[in-house]
Image (spheres, coloured by chain):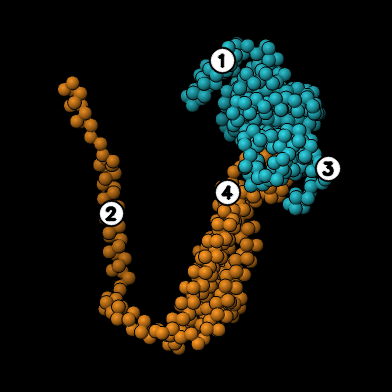
Chain colours: A cyan, B orange
Amino acid sequence: MLEISNLVKRYGHNDPVLKGLDLTVDGSSVVSIVGASGAGKSTMLRCINRLVEPTSGSIRLNGHELVNLRGGELRRARRKIGMVFQGFNLIDRLSVMENVLAGRLGYVSFYQAVTRRFPQTDIDRAFHLMDRVGISHYANKRADQLSGGERQRVAVVRALMQEPEILLADEPTASLDPKTSQQIMGLLQSLASEMSLPVLINIHNVTQARMYTDRIVGMRHGQMIFDGAPKDFNQDALDAIYGGIESPEEEGADSDEGHEAREAVA
Amino acid sequence: MVDHAAKLTERVWSRYDAREQWIRYAVYLATVVLVVWTVRDIDIFWPWVWDAPNQIQNLGARMWPPEFSAWSAILNAMLETVHIATLATLLTVFIALPVSYIAAQNTTPNRITLWLGRLILVSSRSVNTIIWALLFVAIFGPGVLAGILAVMFRSIGFIGKLMGEAIEEIDRRPVEAMLATGAGKMKVVMYAVVPQVMPAFFAIVILRWDINIRESTVLGLVGAGGIGVLLQGSIDTFAWQTVATILLAIIVLVIIGEAITSALRKKVI
């Protein structure tokens, strides 16, 4: 169970990106977070595994406070939080298997990591998970030789190798074509239920958010303005999240997204 | 219609406006002034310049034909030259890599180490190999050891700086992903940084080895070993025919080095 309360993130002396956010995710629910670019979705996700340092507030994962952890404690906490990125963030020059096993870096010794002598249980788990998502025949291929969808599968497996208690996905389908992105969303959904793993997905595609997730959280200007089931996510909610024009630079992106999303709903 | 045409003719365009044009003229003028000033200031003794063609002919005649009787000594000296370059390059790697790690902004532990790294790189790079050699000959006496140290001390700056830049240019996203798995700093470096800088590393080391072979050929001029010792000796004794052979041998060596390095470079990139 993830409990975020009164989370604030401010860069320098600017307006806070997150303004006292509260969010609770329990059990194995798949939650999608929607919002325009700059709404703070990505920052919120990165605050959870502390790739971004929160300014104030509290984030608790299964009862453990994450905000004030340091050094070794922080690394041990991060092992339990898997993350999937928009750009896959694989190590291109390493093989698929090495990328997958990199998910165990928090558990193995430095010597094991450098010499690639991972425990047999890790290797078994790697093959098992790669079989599950259909990439085990690529084990010895270099990661940069795979297609976008395959690369994202590698990234998902890498995150699952951590034996996570929660999975964060930061726009996991934004670099993929529509068909592949549906496959990845479907995969995240079914993996969540198989492993009873809560999954938080930042997503731009409202249609997919409604199709593949149990709950939609809408963010705007660092605040939560919608939280409910996909069936309650109506035109009003959509307008509240994407409508209007905030700042000149976001104008294009916002209206585009709002437009796209509205079409999708209609 | 007429109005429209008139408007069209008024559309004048020029690449630079008046102010930019004046700045350009000023730069031209400054360049000419600088060239004239430097040429006057270095005080060339022109009769010697006009005499140069004669001297070249003269020297050429004295060098011809090359004298090959000392070939085994030359071959040994050449081998020594290559050994100096190779050993110095290898040893440099061990020092240059840690230095590049602390001299790169994204990996250095703190401000102090960053400046320490940069200080090492700058001081290594700002002193020429020959000057380093003079220094080490004074400390360790003439010989190969002084030569190796001289080449090393110059190479640390070269390899360290280029590797530091390679580290700074890596894609940050894999680093982020490795941090997210809970990996410590050294594991992140081994997985996210090292694979990304590998090609640059090999290219830089091969390039430096190539440069070091050429630098090692002149080390002997200050007594730091290699083919230069023979060259200096032959010049001092006016054995111009041997000098010709040594110069030919150096050219052959450099060409061989060039061939090897370009072949290696193709392999790693």
Q: Which residue is mark 1?
A: A262
Q: Is residue A4 visible?
A: no
Q: Are marks 4 and 1 on the same chain?
A: no
Measure the alpha-carbon separation of dots 3 and 2: 72 Å
Protein chain holding label 4? B
Q: Nearer the viewer, mark 4 or mark 1?
A: 1
Which callout, 1 or 2, points to the residue nearer the camera? 1
The alpha-carbon separation of the residues under discs 4 and 1 comes to 43 Å
Report in which chain the residue with disc 1 lies: A
Seen as rendered, the residue at the extreme left is B2
10 Å crowding of disc 2: few (<14), some (14-19), many (20+): few
Tell me the element at label 3: helix
Mark 4 in CB contact with mark 1 (< 8 angstroms) = no
Label 1 close to label 3 by CB (< 8 Å): no
- State the CA–CA distance, disc 1 to disc 2: 61 Å
Residue identified by numbered label 3: A121
